[in-house]
Image: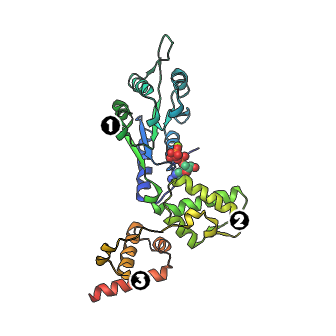
Amino acid sequence: MYALDQILGCSDCMKEVRDLIHRVADSPCHVLITGERGTGKELVAKVIHAMSGRRTASLVPVLCSTLSEAAWGSELFKEAHNGTLFFDEIGELPLSLQAKLVQTIEDKKVHQTGAAQSITVDVRIIASTTLNLEKEVNAKRFRKDLYYRLNVVEIHLPPLRNRRKDIPILAETFLNRYSQEYAKTVLGISESALRLLINYSWPGNVRELESVLERAVTLSHATEILPGDLPAAVQEIGSGTPIRPHRLRRAKTLKQVEEEYICLILDKTGDNKSLAAAILGIDRKTLYRKLADMENKRVRA
Ligand SMILES: Nc1ncnc2c1ncn2[C@@H]1O[C@H](COP(=O)(O)OP(=O)(O)OP(=O)(O)O)[C@@H](O)[C@H]1O
Ligand SMILES: [Mg+2]
């Protein structure tokens, strides 16, 4: 059974996501879930259904890119009657079926090609998309009326690189999951490996993090995950782009850059010193010493 606490993350944006889910789950309104690949859209859809009054009926997933005219109709809606239809990747629904979906939402009836009568259906629609539907509407690939019908409540799942604060708890959860599943005794993640995980850009988002942890648990010979257990891409982060010479005149000193970066990381971590120290690759004592030096300098200036 899916529940709200399965949607992990201590970042403010994930707290807002959970709060929004809590408020809309038991309402009748349709929901649009947006976000990049692997950010948890399907998980959110399952939790909403499980928290709604429709939980005893089915949550029927529909893969929009492969849905044909023939498959559309009363069978699909009958299966989801009193339950939820989850239109996955709604942006890929053919225009002809988009028109039929608007009609069904408006009439609460579905008409199957060839059948004499239409049947009344009671379904809630949850749609997900990785595409920007407003852009799709402007490009005339997505019907405006359907967009407005679905976008009553939008739940946006930000990419993992914009909520790095969530990485330690997600990584730890996946570590425990796979450690148990593969009967291994991997108990934790070393500080240097965690630093790499926090700094990596995660183009595949939470799904990629999960598979990196699965792999690391499988490869691990120790009681904790070490940098060598992580894929090369995660180990090779932070190469940076070269600075052009004409911009060097106004270049900052190493000390200035360090101080600014410390402030930025503290800001991003909500002043969480342990997490900031892990991201910066120094121990907490060193961070406190640097902060004290910065404070002394500020007082003297
Ligand atoms: N906040 C989260 N807490 C715990 N697990 C998560 C979270 N977000 C995603 N996951 C897990 O990550 C994996 C990918 O999530 P999901 O399939 O829901 O993503 P998606 O956005 O639907 O991806 P796609 O666009 O590729 O279909 C799943 O195993 C899911 O349980
Ligand atoms: Mg999905």
Label 2 Cα crowd, 10 Å radius (few <14 / some 14-19 / many 20+)? some
Residue placed at 34% from the left, 74% from the top? 245
Q: Are marks 2 and 1 in contact (CB under 8 Å)?
A: no
Q: Quadrant of the N terminus?
A: top right
Q: Which residue does the numbered mark 3 point to in the structure image?
A: 290
Q: Which residue does the numbered mark 2 point to in the structure image?
A: 185
First reached walking from the N terminus: tag 3 or tag 2 = 2
Query: Which one is closest to the eye, mark 2 or mark 1?
Result: 1
Residue 138, disc: 1
Relative to 274, residue 38 above or below: above
As drawn, the residue found furthest toward the right would be: 183
Distance, label 2 to label 1, CA atoms, is 53 Å
Label 3 Cα crowd, 10 Å radius (few <14 / some 14-19 / many 20+)? some
Relative to 21, residue 110 above or below: above
Residue placed at 56% from the left, 57% from the top? 209
**Identity, as a three-letter code, of the amino acid under mark 2:** Thr
Residue 27 falls in which quadrant of the image? Answer: top left
Q: How is the image coloured?
A: rainbow
**Identity, as a three-letter code, of the amino acid under mark 3:** Lys
Relative placement, left or right, of 235 versus 102 is right
* Callout 3 secondary element: helix
- Let me know if residue 5 appears in the view: no
Q: Nearer the viewer, residue 124 or 55?
A: 124
Where is residue 230? Give x, y as percent.
61, 64
* Callout 2 secondary element: loop
Q: Are marks 3 and 2 in contact (CB under 8 Å)?
A: no
- Let me know if residue 135 appears in the view: yes
Tally the marks: 3
